[in-house]
Image (cartoon, rainbow, N blue to C red):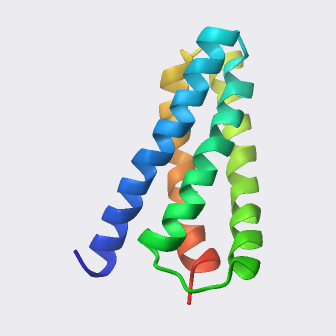
């Protein structure tokens, strides 16, 4: 696929792989190590972020921007996503007692929109 639809499709595919890293880390830390869902989600965010940067740069946006330019921008955008993840997960799991997987699904939806828009127009724009 070409154009915006293809780009969104590629972003979604990369998102699935990043989500596997994120959710796998989250579930393992909560279930095996009894880490709080918020802390585990933030660790998962980092794992998914590594996958996301590598694949979005090379595959989704096919960016030629140097790592020295793209990576700091990606990290700044990821920092906002990290804070959003922490606040949303704490609010949903600790204050509203939403099961952590449902809370993570909701959080992922919000952060996904932020990351697509910001990375498209700030991190990987030619």
Q: Is residue 96 visible?
A: no
Q: Is residue 55 left or right of residue 25?
A: left
Residue drawn 63% across the image and 75% down it: 123
The residue lying toward the viewer, choosing from 107 and 67, is 67
Residue 113 in the image, given as x and y percentages of width and height: 50, 57
Residue drawn 62% across the image and 85% down it: 65
Query: Looking at the rendering, which quadrant does residue 26 occupy?
Result: top right
Q: Quadrant of the C terminus?
A: bottom right
Residue 39 in the image, given as x and y percentages of width and height: 74, 26
Q: Is residue 99 left or right of residue 68?
A: left
Q: Is residue 20 above or below residue 126?
A: above
Q: Is residue 98 above or below residue 85?
A: above
Residue 3 in the image, given as x and y percentages of width and height: 30, 81
Query: Looking at the rendering, which quadrant does residue 74 occupy?
Result: bottom right
Query: Looking at the rendering, which quadrant does residue 1 occupy?
Result: bottom left
Residue drawn 71% across the image and 17% down it: 94
Q: Is residue 119 visible?
A: yes
Q: Is residue 45 above or below residue 10?
A: above
Residue drawn 65% across the image and 19% down it: 29
The residue lying toward the viewer, choosing from 108 and 30, is 30
Residue 6 in the image, given as x and y percentages of width and height: 29, 72
């Amino acid at each position: 696929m070409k154009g915006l639809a293809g780009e969104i499709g590629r972003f979604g595919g990369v998102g699935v792989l990043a989500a596997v890293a994120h959710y796998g880390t989250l579930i393992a830390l909560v279930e095996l190590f009894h880490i709080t869902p918020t802390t585990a989600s933030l660790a998962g965010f980092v794992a998914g972020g590594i996958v996301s940067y590598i694949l979005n740069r090379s595959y989704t946006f096919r960016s030629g921007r140097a790592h020295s330019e793209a990576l700091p921008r990606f990290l700044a955008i990821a920092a906002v996503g990290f804070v959003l993840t922490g606040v949303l997960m704490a609010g949903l799991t600790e204050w509203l007692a939403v099961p952590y997987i449902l809370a993570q699904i909701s959080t992922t939806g919000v952060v996904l929109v932020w990351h697509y828009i910001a990375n498209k127009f700030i991190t990987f724009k030619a």
